[in-house]
Each structure stands twice: as structure tokens, then as C-alpha cells.
Image (tube, grey):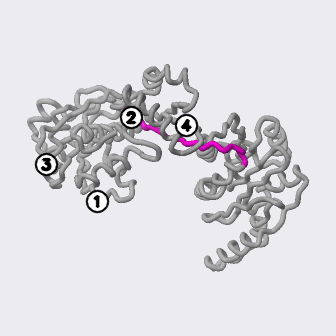
Amino acid sequence: MRAEIIAVGSELLLGQITNTNARFISNQLAEIGVDVYYHTVVGDNADRLLDSIRIAEKRAELIIFSGGLGPTKDDLTKETIAKHLGINLVLDNHAIVYIEDFFKRMDRKMTENNKKQALVLEGCTVLENKHGMAPGMLLSKESHSYMLLPGPPKEMEPMFQFEAKPLLPKLLLDENVIMSHVIRFYGIGEAELETEVQDLLDNQTNPTLAPLASDGEVTLRLTAKSKSEDEAWKKIEELQAEILNRVGKFVYGYNNDSLASKLREILIENNLTISAAESMTAGLFQSELAAVPGMGEALVGGMITYTEDVKIKQLGVDANIIEKYSVVSSQCAEQMALCVKEKFQTDIGVGITGAAGPDGHGGQPAGTIWIGIALGDSKPLTYKLNLSGLRNTNRIRTVKFTIYYLIRLLREQKLVEI
């Protein structure tokens, strides 16, 4: 099956918001073997939307719309589709009751145009919106299927994943099971990774193999088709084993893992606590960890030691170390890690110092970063980064590298396996 995604909304064309919906839907469709060849963005204009629908019908069997289901006059997605297909819009009783109850709970007056959100395409399967008011729809007519989803990601994503996606296998008319598995890498570039697995990419059949780079990370998606989940997973495991044999040292997790969530998992499983002293990242490392639910079981606290004076007087770094080696040095990062570990009485101490840019710092050029990690009673390890980029990009990359080095170090300590 081929699919096309049509995002509706003039705000997308004006650059006021980013079309993250298309990325999410494409990712979800890839997991079940639906090919997406085109993304279309069209403004709040019925004629142009109608043109987009006619074009999409020539090159896709499944057309997915996001946006344009709201209560205002410029929300015209379902009206345009109904007119195009020659069908009526009817009131969905469940949706209208839900909308009325919402306004009662909020003690707000419901305006007449809000009822518009409860209108659905006659004969469609209604997709419940548990995070908003406008229901979604799935309608098949002749050789095409039309799926309508709300625009706000907080409504669209759960609706697609839990209401719409389970209905799609019936449209595929395929008895085979399709299974997808993602391997997540850090510390290796997309080009280098692709080079290492180029022959696997060139000779792929079943499973298929697709690389993707995003935010400094690289992923490989393995997708297998078979008569059963066990058979499909066996195909994936065989290919994964070969990939890990070649580039396993750069793997940090799988599927929905993130660097921070994987680190939390390892720390908690091993009853480890962590603290950090941050200079150029100014708390960004701790903030990234704290964004993961449950991190409080491992993250004890830390310090922002932005100046030399604070490093020395508050954290306890030896002034002679800074004078001899500068604040941007492996020796300073090591001391920061040891001092914060001692001050907060944690199993792991992290020290981050460097020149984020655009100017150099501590006698070192912009992009020079040192990361210190003190683990248990072992001698602290330090890692040097030579980054090039904008100031805040360097800060974010430093945080991700720090988490990656922690995961790798703990794996080397046999506290975690691939």
C-alpha cells in the first residue's frame, strides 16, 4: 500500500509551526510496511485542498489528512472531502456529548460552531479523540481510503497510534506479520555507519534496512515480514547480530530509548547515584536527565560552576590545577568530577568544562570540551571533544556525548549489555 500525507493549515506554510505530524505518521507507517512517497502541505483553501486530494488519489491508495477539523470557518478538511466524495456530514452522538460535557466541566459557554467538530463523514469509522474534541475518521470508498486526523500533535499522535493504526492491517489485505525494530547509535556519523553496513544495505531483501540521522544520533530500522512474529523476529535478530558485530560499540539502545532514558535505566538497575558539576553547559546536563520521569531515584544534585572563583571556592577545585592547566583541561574536568562526587556523596561524579564558542576560553579554541567521569573508587576518566558549530549546538552535543560516554563506561564495567 502507498500512502500520502496531506497536512492542512496556512500556519504551516507561513512557517509559524513545524510539520512534525508528517514525520510521526511516516515513522508509524514504516513499521507496518506502508510506503509514503509524498508529503503535501496545503493552506486553508478549499480549492487548493481539492486539487491536492485529486493529485494524491493518482499516486496513493491511503490518503491521510492532519488538521482542519476544528470549529472555525477555515477548518474545512472534512467539508472538502465530503463534497469531493459526494457524501454527507452527520452528527456523531458520542462526540457531541463529549464536547458538551467538556464545556460543562470547564464552566464555559459552548458556542454553536463547536458543534461542527462533532460532524463526521457518513459511513466512516469514527476515531475517538481522548485528548481533544474533534474526532478522527477513516473511510474507504472504491479504491481509496481516507483518514482524517486532528492537527495538534498531542491529539493526533495518540489517536493515530491507538485508534487508527490498529485498523490499517485490514486495509493491507496481507496475512503476513510485519515487525520493525530500531537500533540507536551515538558517537558515529551517518556516513561512517553507512560505510560499515553498505553491503547489507545494497543486498537487503527481507528484512529491509533503513538508516536515519537526527539530532546527532543515527538509527537503523530493521523491518521484517513473515507468517508469524517469531519468524519475523528471527530474521531481525540474524541481521542485528551482524550489525552489532561491526558497529556494536556505538549502540546505546533500541526502539523508543533515548540517551537519557537509557542512562536512567542503567543507573536504577544498578542502584547508582549521580551528581554533576557543570561549567559551559550551565545545568543543561542535569536538565536533560531530569526530563526523564523517575530520574530522581538516581540524580542527587549538582552545581553550576561557571567561573573560576566558584570552581575553586564553592566546588573545591585546586587553584593550582587551574593556574597550571587552565579551566579547559582534562585535569580541571577530572577535579570537578571528583569534587562533586565527594560533595554530594554519589557513586558517580561528572565534570563538564570547555569553550562553547564563538570565542576561545582558558587558552583553548572554541569547541574544545573536556568531560570528566569519576566512577566509584576508580581513577577518573576524561574525554575530549573538538566540536565545530554554534554555541548552543556545542552545548547540546556536549550533554549528549556525556550521557553516551557514561553509558559506554558502565557497559565496559559489565553493568549493562548491548
Q: Residue at x 51, y 31 (%)?
A: 211
- Residue 276's tag is none
Q: Mark 1 or mark 3: which comes first in sequence? A: 1
Q: Secondary structure at mark 2?
A: loop
CB under 8 Å between discs 4 and 3: no
Write the start and end of the magenta stretch as one range.
Answer: 171-187
Identify residue type, mark 3.
Lys
Identify residue type, mark 2.
Tyr
Instruction: Mark yes or no: residue 217 visible.
Output: yes
- Residue 313's tag is 3
In-front residue for pair 283/36: 36
- Residue picked out by circle 1: 297
Q: Residue at x 34, y 39 (%)?
A: 418
Q: Quadrant of residue 205?
A: top right
Q: Residue furthest right?
A: 86
Q: Mark 3 or mark 2: which comes first in sequence? A: 2
Identify residue type, mark 4.
Thr
Q: Mark 1 or mark 4: which comes first in sequence? A: 4
- Residue 186's tag is 2
- Residue picked out by circle 4: 223
Local crowd at mark 1 within 10 Å, few (<14), some, or many (≥20)? some
Q: Secondary structure at mark 1?
A: helix
Question: Residue 241: horizontal and vertical position, in percent?
Answer: 40, 32
- CA separation in Å, label 1 and label 3: 29 Å
